Amino acid sequence: MASDHERLRALKAFDDTKAGVKGLVDAGVTAVPSIFHHPPESLLLDACPRHHLDHEQHFTIPVIDLAAGDRAALVAQVKAAAETVGFFQVLNHGVPESAMSDMLACVRRFHESPAEAKAPYYTRDPGRRVQYKSNFDLFQSPAANWRDTLFLETAPAPEEIPPECRAIAPEYARLVRELGRALLELLSEALGLDPRFLEQECLDGHGLTVAGHYYPACPEPRLTMGTTRHSDPSFLTVLLQDAVGGLQVLVDRLDEDGIKQPAAWVDVPAVPGALVVNVGDYLQLVSNDRFKSVEHRVVASGVGPRVSVACFLRTDTSTKVLTPMVTGDHGEARYKSTTVAELVKHYRAKGLDGTSSLQHLRV
């Protein structure tokens, strides 16, 4: 096993290439470097026990048609999904399929462009609105993931965006922001509040981070992960994924007698024309556990690349204080109030280590 010093040296050497995991694949690696090896105990925790398989086969992530049924029925569907599994897919969401396919294509073009063309965007400077990097938590997490990402923070100037995405990403972000507002209205109504409550109280601006993920085919997928189990630092996340697969959600199970069973990993398959929506940590805190921010992961695969685009709905104001709403059955605050800046700092410091970002705030 490599010493901490040797590991740090290997991490720096990898990072200094500015070529990411794609650079390793282009170089023809046939074995996964040790910095990507997840500890055996971690892989065991992430493994899906065989007795869960029957549950997986009978459980599917809800698919909600935003244009079907009356308003009350739609609110009820969104409420049920947010309170139980924390994930759902939406159809007739207002984002044209052409915009979706163009966005996936531009992210893929960027990641597959020559290394020297991508290198100027490679950075770990959180102040830059456009950041290309492999693993935002490369130097914090126990093991690296088999993934590269292009981050576009809120409203970068057009000239800052890579040419491959310049004509596409801003419009796609606008469309997803509009969808986010519509979803927050439904979720506000699900809480018995004014439809505009969550947008006004939580977003107060145009906060949206776009993450264009690229998961190359992996030569030894059983040794690593595409993305470690985690929950999201957002109010909502809207995910666009291609047809390769690999996204899984950790779902609670009950037996026939209503007794809680070990949680199971459930696939989130690509549904044509759909976007995947999940509750983030910020919304779980503000809703005082009414809505669930659920752990999810992406498994590494010998098939690829997998391309996805995650849009994280956040607030522009880092000093914004998030306070649990105390209502009805949730009559006591389950979390300490905190600022978005404090949550972001904690999330970046701990990285994707398989633990909840909210645990340290529980009362």
Image: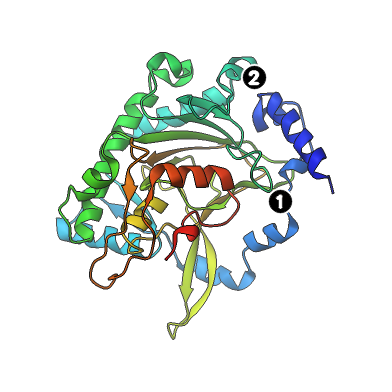
Give the mark toward the camera: 2 or 1.
Answer: 1
**Tag 1: residue type?**
His
Q: Position of residue 156 (x, y in %)?
A: 39, 22
Q: Which mark is residue 38?
A: 1
Of 6 and 81, nearer the camera is 6
Can you say whether 79 is above or below 259 in the image? above
Tell me the quarter of the picture where residue 180 sits: top left
Q: Residues within 10 Å of mark 2 (few under 14, many from 20)?
A: some
Residue visible at 57% across and 68% down in the picture: 53
Q: Which mark is residue 266?
A: none
Q: CA distance from mark 2 to mark 1?
A: 26 Å
The answer to whether residue 70 is visible is no
Hey, which residue is sitting farthest bottom in the picture?
A: 257
Quick check: marks 2 and 1 in contact, CB under 8 Å?
no
**How many marks overall?**
2
Q: Earlier in the sequence, mark 2 or mark 1?
A: 1
Can you say whether 118 is above or below 349 in the image? above
Q: Which mark is residue 115?
A: 2
Q: Position of residue 147 (x, y in %)?
A: 61, 38
Residue visible at 52% across and 76% down in the picture: 261
Does dot 2 land on a helix, a strand or a loop?
Answer: helix
Can you say whether 51 is above or below 238 in the image? below
The answer to whether residue 107 is visible is yes
Q: Position of residue 14 (x, y in %)?
A: 72, 30
Residue visible at 46% across and 82% down in the picture: 259
Of 15 and 111, nearer the camera is 15
Q: Is residue 242 left or right of residue 205?
A: right
Tell me the quarter of the picture where residue 166 sits: top left
Can you say whether 46 is above or below 91 in the image? below
